[in-house]
Amino acid sequence: MHDIRLIRDDPAAFDAAMARRGIAGAAAPLLALDEARRAAIHAAETARAQQNAASKQVGQAKAQGDEAAFERLRAEVTAKKAEVTDQEQRARELDGQLIDQLLALPNALAPDVPEGADESDNVEIKRHLDPPDMPHAVEHYDLPAAAPGLDFETAARLSGSRFALLTGQVARLHRALAQFMLDIHTTENGLTEAIPPVLVRDEAMQGTGQLPKFGEDSYQTTNGWWLIPTAEVPLTNIVAGQVLDEATLPRRYVAHTLCFRSEAGSAGKDTAGMLRQHQFEKVEMVSITHPDASEDEQLRMLACAEGILERLDLPYRVVKLCDGDTGFGARRTFDIEVWLPGQNRYREISSVSNCWDFQARRMNARYKPADGGKPQFLHTLNGSGLAVGRALIAVLENGQLPDGTVALPEALVPYMGGVGELTA
């Protein structure tokens, strides 16, 4: 969320920042609400002062036996009390409207975010391994070694479209990938493992930016909980409403969870296979940092995610998202795209975003400077480390041999009980 004081101090800069997000003239309606809210607060304070002054005079008039003055002053006290109530109510209503409008606005972008309309304008900044020449390549669901363990028909009968039932060696490979990622992140990358709830309150979704604007993208239970779209939501909200000691920063978490997305607006996209599903699993990284450290932290998290792909011997590239493709809460995002031979293209497998203090303001998450002074807002970052289902697809498709067998990456063999390939 944005600070209305900063908007008040430099509305032109705020308008320029929102213009990059495709929002014109954002400051004016906010400042009009802010001015009306402050006027109502001032009116309430003035009326209260007048009420207090009249209250003192009521006693004096009574003591002096001035009945006319007593009645007049008592009526004034009653009127001023009502005026205070009305102005305070108006201030609360205007404050709520202002907060609602601020919550609906996206984060400002970093100066180095490229200009562009959509993903076609993202800028490639790195490539690891050349895509293999695989004229025999098919998509994961057509692989003889994998197809028996990818049951979309039964899943559709159980739950509908965009679900998968994994069985046998494919299910074990999926589990192995998640365990491998967690082990690397906790033992080598210094992340603290967490097992958070996958049902959260409105406040948690609002804190990370899923609400109020993107409620249709998630699932809500009949009693008001939300199924998390990513573990970013509960992990980041660990510090909601907290004031941390600076010495405890950074805080780095990792969690392997189920994730749920309605995929609103994606009708007709990636309907085959398990690339885009309503229920999936991710290993998610979240960092809570000092503002001075968040830029370096984003690069560190990016390296953590890349390291998983490199150990799996998977070709990938890193792109910096343009302003038209950067998510609502992010100031800057790097996507890692893994090569999928079956599609003959790169597909996203991780997004690593620096949100600066945008989420912290929504959550009121701050730290106490070591040298004293007023508590300051934290910076928050998140990144996939990695999307487990998409990693499964990448391992299957990049490891496929002409006879339909899948050769597994060496790093996964211990997690597969010594099995180095999948066969039909």
Image: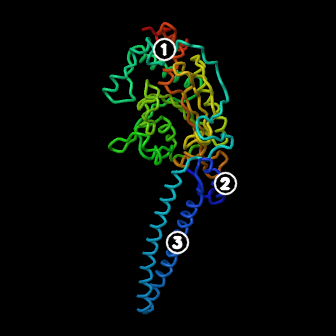
Category of crowding for the residue at label 2, using alpha-carbon neighbours closer than 10 angstroms: few (below 14), some (14–19), many (at least 20): few
- Under mark 2, the amino acid is Ala
- Under mark 1, the amino acid is Tyr
Do the CB atoms of the residues marked 2 and 3 lie less than 8 Å apart? no
The answer, for residue 62, to whether it is visible in the render is: no
Residue 324 percent across, percent down from the top left? 59, 42
Q: Which residue lies furthest to the top in this view?
A: 403
Residue 399 percent across, percent down from the top left? 53, 13
Residue 45's mark?
Answer: 3
Q: Quadrant of the C terminus?
A: top left
- Under mark 3, the amino acid is Glu
Category of crowding for the residue at label 3, using alpha-carbon neighbours closer than 10 angstroms: few (below 14), some (14–19), many (at least 20): some
Quick one: label 3 or label 1, which is nearer the N terminus?
A: 3
The coloring applied to the image is rainbow
- The span from disc 2 to disc 1 (Cα, nearest Å) is 53 Å
In the figure, 417 relative to 164: above or below? above
- The span from disc 3 to disc 1 (Cα, nearest Å) is 68 Å
Tag 1's secondary structure? helix
Q: Which residue is drawn at 45% across and 39% down?
A: 265
Residue 182's mark?
Answer: none
Q: Which residue is drawn at 64% across and 18% down?
A: 130
The residue at which mark 1 appears reads as: 415
Closer to the eye: label 2 or 3: 2
Q: Which residue is drawn at 47% across and 38% down?
A: 234
Q: How many marks?
A: 3
The residue at which mark 2 appears reads as: 13
| Image quadrant in which you'd find residue 195 | top left
Do the CB atoms of the residues marked 3 and 1 lie less than 8 Å apart? no
Quick one: label 2 or label 1, which is nearer the N terminus?
A: 2
